[in-house]
Image (cartoon, rainbow, N blue to C red):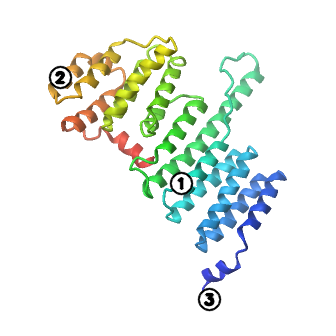
Amino acid sequence: MSTRERTRRELPPVQEHIDKLKKVVEEGNGYGALQMYKSISARYVTAQRFSEALEILFSGACVELEHGLVNCGADLAILFVDTLVKAKSPCNDESLDRIRCMFKLFPRVPVPPHLVDVSDDEDVHNLQESLGEARSRVDNLTSFLRAAIRWSVEFGGPSTGYPELHAMLADYLYTECPELDMVRISRHFVRADDPEKFASTLINFMGRCYPGEDDVAIARAVLMYLSMGNMKDANFLMDEIKKQAETKNLELSESDLIKFITYLLETLQRDALPLFNMLRVKFKSCIDRDCLLNELLDEIAERFYGVQRRNPMQGMFGDIFKMMG
């Protein structure tokens, strides 16, 4: 009898481990339980009993997260996805449901206002501690969902990753990250198949950003959709932003950049490369406010009109993002 066959026979029913390790966490030894979850699940993986290894890791991630042990829970959630890959498990409802469950258990903790009395050492210390914890939560969640996106690409999901996973990550990054990175958030939203939610996020951002950032964020969002060839959602996004702004009595920017985006959407409806180029020249000063806008426009010109990029390095950011999920 081979070592693997002997291991398969010797392993006890998985529920025994789940019950025992849950008790260890409840007794306050979350880190000790983490090590046991890892070592025990590894035995099942070695024996190629992947479904049982996944049960152990899923249970462990949920128990650790339910007890506020985010680092431990995230480690097991990432290991759960790694095991999906080892098992060559398809991107199906069962696995996605488990990923959804783990995602919902990641805590959402309001970060205190940055306005503190800088002369009060305790205030400053508490703020720094809260920000550090928030960054750690975001980093953990990001590592988990990026791994899940890569798995979904490799095992039956869309080439850009399962949309709901992108939606989860975009929403968490926007609501929980102390330093908003709208480029990063937008990269996920345009792959999330939910332009209405994206529009709501951009409307919310208008009330949080510095003057002059709102129109750039909207322009980037529309151009990202267009760079993927997604005219439908690009137009829907602009219409939805206008609709929601009107409903909330918000004044939507009428800057040159927004005018450019409006003209561009009309131009791309027809075969009008000369007009496309004329628009880029006429609105160059506002487009140059953000270097990513020009890169996206080069990608749009290539996709819609077959124009080769002048710099072959352009577009690399998007390609790298796609590979990384």
Residue 71 got which mark? none
Residue drawn at x 67%, y 44% is 105
Of labels 2 and 3, the one closer to you: 2
Q: Is residue 160 above or below residue 262?
A: below
Q: Is residue 310 visible?
A: no
Q: Residue 31, position in %: x, y? A: 75, 53
Q: Nearer the viewer, residue 81 or 134?
A: 81
Judge the density around disc 1: few (<14), some (14-19), many (≥20) Cα neighbours within 10 Å.
few
Which residue type carries mark 1?
A: Asp
Q: Position of residue 136 (x, y in %)?
A: 63, 39
Name the residue carrying label 1. 93
Q: Is residue 115 left or right of residue 83?
A: right
Among the two numbered marks 2 and 1 on one chain, the one whose residue lies closer to the N terminus: 1
User: Which numbered disc flags the more N-terminal residue, 1 or 3?
Assistant: 3
Q: Nearer the viewer, residue 130 or 153?
A: 153
Specify whether 261 is left or right of 208. Answer: left
Q: Work out whether 296 lies above or below 8.
A: above
The reply to whether dot 2 and dot 3 touch (C-beta < 8 Å) is: no
**Residue type indicated by callout 3:** Met
| Cα distance in 3D space between marks 2 and 1 | 46 Å
Q: Which amino acid, by three-letter code, is at mark 2?
A: Leu
Q: Position of residue 217 (x, y in %)?
A: 43, 24
Q: Residue at x 42, y 18 (%)?
A: 242
Mark 3, residues whose alpha carbon is within 10 Å: few (<14), some, or many (≥20)?
Answer: few
Q: Nearer the viewer, mark 1 or mark 3?
A: 1
Residue at 70% x, 56% y is 60
Earlier residue among tags 2 and 3: 3
Q: Which residue is mark 2?
A: 275
Q: Which mark is residue 1?
A: 3
34 sits to left or right of 145: right
